[in-house]
Amino acid sequence: MLVLLCAALNGAGFLWHLFEPVPLYDEVARFVTPFTLVAITAEIIYSNGGDDDFFPTPSRAALSGAAIGLAGAAGWEGIEVLLDAAGFAISHAPPDTVFDVVLGAAGGATGGWAADRYLDWLFGRSRLRPRRRVR
């Protein structure tokens, strides 16, 4: 569901140019996208048994998610600079860029926290001993 929401949100924003004229549209998209990407990445790592390395505590999960969100947001801002240089109408003013990167890190941190919180439940594992099944 999150992937469909993220694709619809970003697709509609690009198709109908909704990012600037619609209040908070850009901000919601900049938060939801890294949240979704980090949650999916966490689920892939978790389902392959890597949860102890990346998500041993909620704060570590949020920190890992923030790092992933920060890297993704900074990379996207670089792409926006290239698109603007190619002639596309893209806003990359410093305040907008900084705010977008902060929202990316915040969305990633929230995605990491949510993954840590709910993947144990989803996979039926104990929060105290991840290798033990609880169902």
Image (tube, helix red, strand yellow):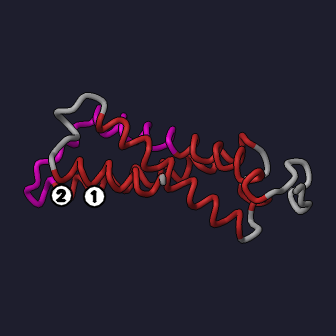
Residue 48 pos. (x, y %): 72, 71
**Mark 1 Cα shell of 10 Å, populated few (<14), some (14-19), many (≥20):** few
**SS state under label 1:** helix
The residue pinned by badge 2 equals 83
In the rendered structure, which segment of residues is drawn in magenta? 84-107
Q: Are marks 1 and 2 in contact (CB under 8 Å)?
A: yes
Foreground of the two, 20 or 71: 20
Please tell me which residue is depicted at 22% across the width and 43% down the height of the picture. 92
Please tell me which residue is depicted at 70% across the width and 47% down the height of the picture. 118
Q: Is residue 46 above or below residue 29?
A: below
Please tell me which residue is depicted at 89% across the width and 55% down the height of the picture. 134
**SS state under label 2:** helix
Q: Is residue 25 above or below residue 80?
A: above
* Amino acid, disc 1: Ile
Foreground of the two, 106 or 5: 5
Q: Is residue 19 above or below residue 122?
A: above
The residue pinned by badge 1 equals 79
Query: Does the magenta stretch mainly form a helix, a strand or a loop?
Result: helix
Indicate the quadrant containing the C terminus: top left, top right, bottom left or bottom right. bottom right
Question: Which of the labelled discs sits on residue 53, or is there none?
Answer: none
Q: From mark 1 to mark 2, how far is it between C-alphas? A: 6 Å
